[in-house]
Amino acid sequence: MGETETYTVTGPDGDEESFELPAGLVDVLSEQGEPATAVVSDVVVQAMAQQAHVIVHHSEGDVPEDIAEMNETAAELFEERFGQPLEEALGHSH
């Protein structure tokens, strides 16, 4: 296995989880001068918003109201962070 870099996420209750990524991968995804933590955070926000979208819009049956609300909030946070609607970034809308 190649070299890795360790990143740590801290939750609202103070619990922490560390994970490894291939060394240099975050640099490949970053713009010049962008901190590595911003890149990893961007990917997390994007992935969570996308997963919420999939749960709400691509699952069979009705989705509980609290999960639908989480999806709306995730989409709003995505747009605040990236300056474009999630639906536009995904290339489709519902």
Image (tube, rainbow, N blue to C red):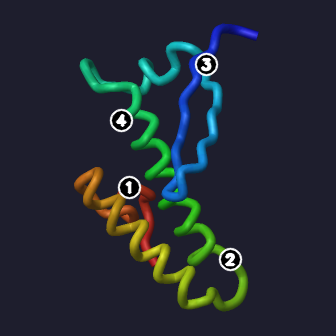
The residue tagged 4 is 38
Q: Nearer the viewer, mark 4 or mark 2?
A: 4
Q: Secondary structure at mark 2?
A: loop
User: What is the CA distance from the residue labelled 4 to the residue labelled 2?
Assistant: 31 Å
**Label 4 neighbourhood size at 10 Å, few (<14), some (14-19), many (20+)?**
few
Identify residue type, mark 2.
Ser
Give coordinates of residue 35: x percent, y percent: 32, 26
Identify residue type, mark 1.
Ala
Give coordinates of residue 68: x percent, y percent: 52, 82
Choose the circle earlier in sequence order: 1 or 3: 3
Between 5 and 42, the one lying in front of the other is: 5
Q: Nearer the viewer, mark 4 or mark 1?
A: 4
The answer to whether residue 33 is above or below residue 81 is: above
Give coordinates of residue 49: x percent, y percent: 48, 61
User: What is the CA distance from the residue labelled 4 to the residue labelled 1?
Assistant: 19 Å
Q: Disc 4, disc 2: CB below 8 Å?
A: no
The residue tagged 3 is 22
Choose the circle earlier in sequence order: 2 or 3: 3
Choose the circle earlier in sequence order: 4 or 2: 4
The residue tagged 2 is 59
Task: Name, please, the residue furthest toward the right.
Answer: 1
Identify residue type, mark 3.
Pro
The residue tagged 1 is 89
Q: What residue is at 68 percent from the left and 77 percent from the top?
A: 59
Identify residue type, mark 4.
Ala
Q: Secondary structure at mark 3?
A: strand
